Amino acid sequence: MSSTAENVQEEIDLGPANKVIDKYLTMKGALMPVLQEIQEEYGYIPEPTVHLVAERLNVYSSQIFGVLTFYAQFHLEPRGKYIIRVCMGTACHVKGAGRIADTLEERLGIGHAQTTEDLKFTVEHVACIGACGMAPVIMVNDATFGSLSVQKLDEVIVKYKAMD
Ligand code: FES
């Protein structure tokens, strides 16, 4: 995965990031909206864009990394097209979330906060997502799947694996 990450870093086109910065250049407090839009453009915040933002907004890169690591919404690594959130809240835990998480790890070969090499899936274990009545629950992007059994989980995985 590390060689893939290095290749990704080298291929970063800074054009979209420059466009985002152009938009906010004269605005006070531009850092957060700039970082949010850069993440929307690339799906994460590539390291070269951090240095670009630092240079153009006249802030230290270390300050930007501080912001990026403080706010959970920002990601410094590429993420999968499909983000699978496995609820590990109390209701889901009681109804077998651990087995769901283990099965997912077996099927995809990735655990919490990891991304498949083909950048298709990222798995995240999260706190209650507010659907306790359907425990155990996972979300794939915006879609919720509840009352999961291993068999039902397998059906969800097969469905998303077949999608582009
Ligand atoms: S504990 Fe899982 S949805 Fe609430």
Image (cartoon, grey):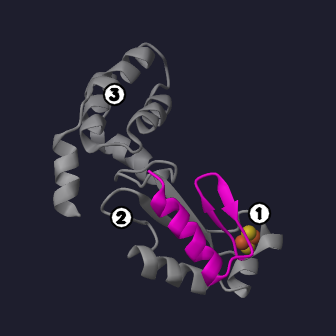
Q: Which residues are magenta?
A: 136-164
Which three-letter amino acid code belongs to the residue tagged 1? Gly
Q: Is any part of residue 59 visible from this angle?
A: yes
Q: Is residue 125 left or right of residue 55?
A: right
Q: Is any part of residue 125 visible from this angle?
A: no
Mark 2 beta carbon near ligand 1 (under 8 Å): no
Write down the quadrant of residue 12 in the picture.
top left
Residue appearing at x 42%, y 55% in the figure: 80
Establish if 42 lies above or below 88: above
Disc 3 versus disc 1: distance between alpha carbons?
35 Å
Lower sequence index among marks 2 and 3 = 3
The mark found on residue 130 in the picture is: 1
Q: Position of residue 118 (x, y in %)?
A: 32, 58
Lower sequence index among marks 2 and 1 = 2
Q: Which residue is mark 3?
A: 17
Establish if 58 lies above or below 68: above
Lower sequence index among marks 3 and 1 = 3
Ligand 1 quadrant assignment: bottom right
Give the quadrant of the N terminus: bottom left
Mark 1 beta carbon near ligand 1 (under 8 Å): yes
| Residue closest to the eye, 32 or 134 | 134
Residue appearing at x 40%, y 23% in the figure: 20
Secondary element under disc 1, as helix, strand or loop, is loop
- The answer to whether marks 2 and 3 mark residues whose Cβ atoms lie closer than 8 Å is no
Write down the quadrant of residue 39 in the picture.
top left
The mark found on residue 116 in the picture is: 2
Q: Residues within 10 Å of mark 3 (few under 14, many from 20)?
A: many
Establish if 47 lies above or below 154: above
